[in-house]
Image (cartoon, rainbow, N blue to C red):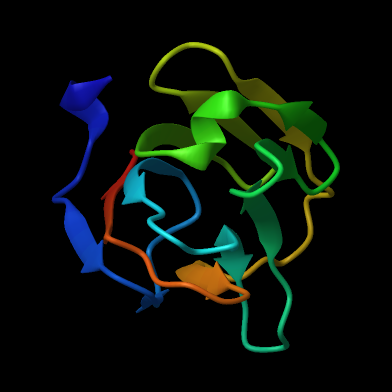
Amino acid sequence: MSASRGAPRHLVGAGLITEAGECLELRWELDPGEADGSTLDLHCGPAGEFTRIGLDHRRGRVWLDGGGEQHWAGARGALVLRVIVSPASVDVASGDGQVVLGARLDPVAAGQGVAVLKQGSGDWVRSVLTVWPLA
């Protein structure tokens, strides 16, 4: 797949990458430290719309809007998530192979932003998101 990747963009810590693109490959390296939860929002648009991947670090859960929820002990510590995004679907896999989630999306005029947010109390030790547009 690397042959169809565009130039990578990086986001360190919480924040937003605007105009990331419709078709993306993402790698999120996160050490949640004492954070309660973390989210990765995809298809962020100007009207506030998004598709969310969530991590509950306290309960050890990972979830995807429209794609269910899974127990994952790996959500409690340092982790890597790989995400493939298209206008009609999102697929999530953990670096340790323990989590695979997918969801089909309604093909509406979605935004092209990507956001990383910390939820609740506590601070991250490290969060690095790498985003590649896909041709």
Image quarter hosting the C terminus: top left
**Residue at figure coordinates x 48%, y 72% from the top left:** 122
Residue 14 location, x and y as percent?
Answer: 38, 75
Q: Is residue 23 above or below residue 15?
A: above
The answer to which of 51 and 80 lies nearer the viewer is 80
Left or right: residue 69 versus residue 26 is right
Residue 41 appears in which quarter of the rendering? Answer: bottom right
Residue 26 location, x and y as percent?
Answer: 37, 43
Left or right: residue 7 versus residue 33 is left
Residue 36 appears in which quarter of the rendering? Answer: bottom right
Residue 7 location, x and y as percent?
Answer: 13, 50
**Residue at figure coordinates x 42%, y 39% from the top left:** 77
**Residue at figure coordinates x 42%, y 32% from the top left:** 82
Image quarter hosting the N terminus: top left
The answer to which of 105 and 34 lies nearer the viewer is 34
Residue 126 location, x and y as percent?
Answer: 25, 58
Q: Is residue 42 above or below residue 70?
A: below
**Residue at figure coordinates x 86%, y 42% from the top left:** 66
The answer to which of 19 and 38 lies nearer the viewer is 38
Left or right: residue 28 versus residue 8 is right
